[in-house]
Amino acid sequence: MKSSPRRYLLIPLCAAWLLAMFFIYIELRHSGLRTLRDLWSILIQVSGVTFPLLFVSIYLSNKRLQKRFDNLSSSIAQAKEEELSRNRSIIEGTEVGTWDWNLKTGELVLNERWAGILGYTLEELKPIGISTWERTVHPDDMQSAEIMRHQHLRGEKKYYDAQFRQRHKNGEWRWINARGKLVEWTPTGEPLRMSGTHMDITEQKEAELALSESKRMLRRVLNTIPARVFWKDTHSVFLGCNQLLAQDLGQETPYDLIDKTDYDFFSKEEAERFRQDDQEVMRTGKAKIAYEEALKRPDGGLIWLLTSKVPLRDQDDKIIGVLGTYEDISLRKQTEFELIQAKEAAEAASKAKSEFLAVMSHEMRTPLNPILGFADILLESCTEEPEVSYINTIISSGQRQLALIDDILHYMRIISERVEPNNQQFNLVKFCQSLIEELQPSAGELTLHFQNGKLGAPVPVDLCVETDQHMLRRILENLLNNSIKYTHSGSVNLQLSMKASPSPRFQFTVQDTGIGIEASQQKQLFDPFSQVDASYTRKHEGIGLGLAICQKLTHLLDGKIGLQSTLGQGSTFTVDLPLQVVTESPASITTDRPTPRKEKFARPYKILIVDDKPDNILIAKALVESHQGQAHTANNGKEAIASCQKETFDLILMDLSMPLMNGIQASNWIRSHSSENQHTPIIAMTANVDKEAQNACHEAGMAAFISKPIQSQDFFQTLNALLK
């Protein structure tokens, strides 16, 4: 319990009073009280003793009280100093400036840190007043800071809290956060004094501005990309989206979509489908990327979407929702549909063209089959003139007609892009030599030579190359035949040379001493159906496809073809090809040279001829019997199957185009059903020389392919090779 000052005064008073009473008591006891005067006398005597004691006691009490008061004052002062020291340390530790503003006088008290934030010392800022703040604050921020101050002074805000820019000593603007409050009022209740702090928040503000700009940039990116973007929470509730998606769903801004679900915009079935996709992605943690889905429009039509969804994770990798995008691909789907239709139409047109070429090939070549076939047979049995000359004329005319048909059909295949190189390996020098030997009879009195290395480095005689041998043969045959046709005297030469670096290239040169070509006509010479002399009075035959075919085939082999010609002196055609050199042994290299032929079969083989044309059956039967074979016939595929079920044959000649059942169907049936003829060799015999037809024959189990019109020697060679 604390002692009060009154208590210290009461103690000496009580002691003096007790002492006086004690003296009075003693006196009364010894002398008794006789009169009032005697009583006053006693009191005066007692006062002479007690009052000095009282004054001494009061003096001592005051001394003690003053000491305690001094100690208390010292303690309070020390506590205040310690509090001020702590506050000063806290302020200095937080590096904030302090200010104290007298609203009446305008006096402003600042600490050193307040000035230091702006790069000054307090001394440099003197005289200090409210103008010190006003002349450093940014003009654009002055009004907002004043509004905050007035709101606080009116009691609308508990604290004054403003952010503004102040100019630093170095000229840059620093962001400041000023916080304070009203701490003193006048006796009439008017605001008198405000105190607060100044804090440099430039880095924080710049970070906030950067974050804000980053958010704005992200929003601009989301609203710029040509896709719809959205994100949802774990309950498939929209948390945000971009402007495109908001527009798709009939909302003005992306914020209008927040807290809504797919059920607010789509039918129950579609919304449930979307929700199930969301839940699957969040449940499995696996993304669903670029899957197509259809969305029904209000008018019943379909919108096609290309959608992707991925799990949305927080910083701890916990799945907190789903992030998705989709793109309206309705136009693309429509384009794809139209492309598919166009592709199907193109394929149908291509198929129709292929079928047309097959029919044309069949119909144009078939009539030549009996003409050339019977002429060939008659030539073997006829030895006298003029019959031999007549037959040779028939054969020559038929072969020219056949060459013309082959040129037309081959060119149509090339421009239809239905011809691709089929590489083989062969000896190049021997290939050129055999080509010259085969064309020698057609040269007549012309000199036809092969020269290796005359115009460049020679090709080694054992060098083998890999390319499409048949294409190369057709190119050189066309050029040589062309030169022979337009050269009436002199020579036609095939010259071969090579360049070994940087990669092997080979030059084939066909040089003649023919009529030559005018310079004005050379440019269109490789155009289809173009001729030097296109008049009805021309001396030379042809329709102008030979050189066009040569150019197309040369390009297919990645080569170049060129021409140099002088009218009246001759022409030189050069074919430059990048052929691949191979190192296989000669035994593995295929050759295109004919092998020796026998005139008769080893024994009378039993051969089934299947064809719907009587003249074709007649020529095939005659050829089989001329080589001592036994011929049996059938008019279509069904008759062929019936014959195969009754008899055993050594070989079957099968036409492809027949009524009731074609040759491909009949061959498939024979190969797929157990019989004595299941493995009997079947040879396709057709006027359709298309590569696709040949492939179809091989797929049906046919062993070989003979083109119509049938050549006697080729016919025997092919059959005899399979009958051995």
Image (cartoon, grey):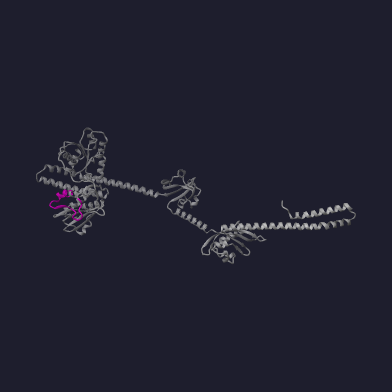
Magenta stretch contains residue 439 = yes
Taking the spot 67% from the left edge, 57% from the top edge, the residue there is 76
Q: Say which of 166 and 38 sits in front.
A: 38
Residue projecting furthest to the right: 34
Report whether 45 appears left or right of 713: right
Q: How many marks?
A: 0
Q: Say which of 261 and 121 sits in front.
A: 121
Residue projecting furthest to the bottom: 127
Report whether 150 appears left or right of 58: left
Above or below for 707 versus 91: above
Magenta stretch contains residue 3 = no
Q: Position of residue 542 (x, y in %)?
A: 19, 52
Q: Position of residue 198 (x, y in %)?
A: 57, 60
Q: Say which of 80 and 724 sits in front.
A: 80
Can residue 273 be seen in this snapshot? no
Can residue 401 be seen in this snapshot? yes
Residue projecting furthest to the left: 384
Q: Position of residue 310 (x, y in %)?
A: 44, 47
Q: Position of residue 475 (x, y in %)?
A: 21, 51
- Residues rendered magenta in the picture: 434-460
Q: Quadrant of residue 127?
A: bottom right
Q: Quadrant of the C terminus?
A: top left
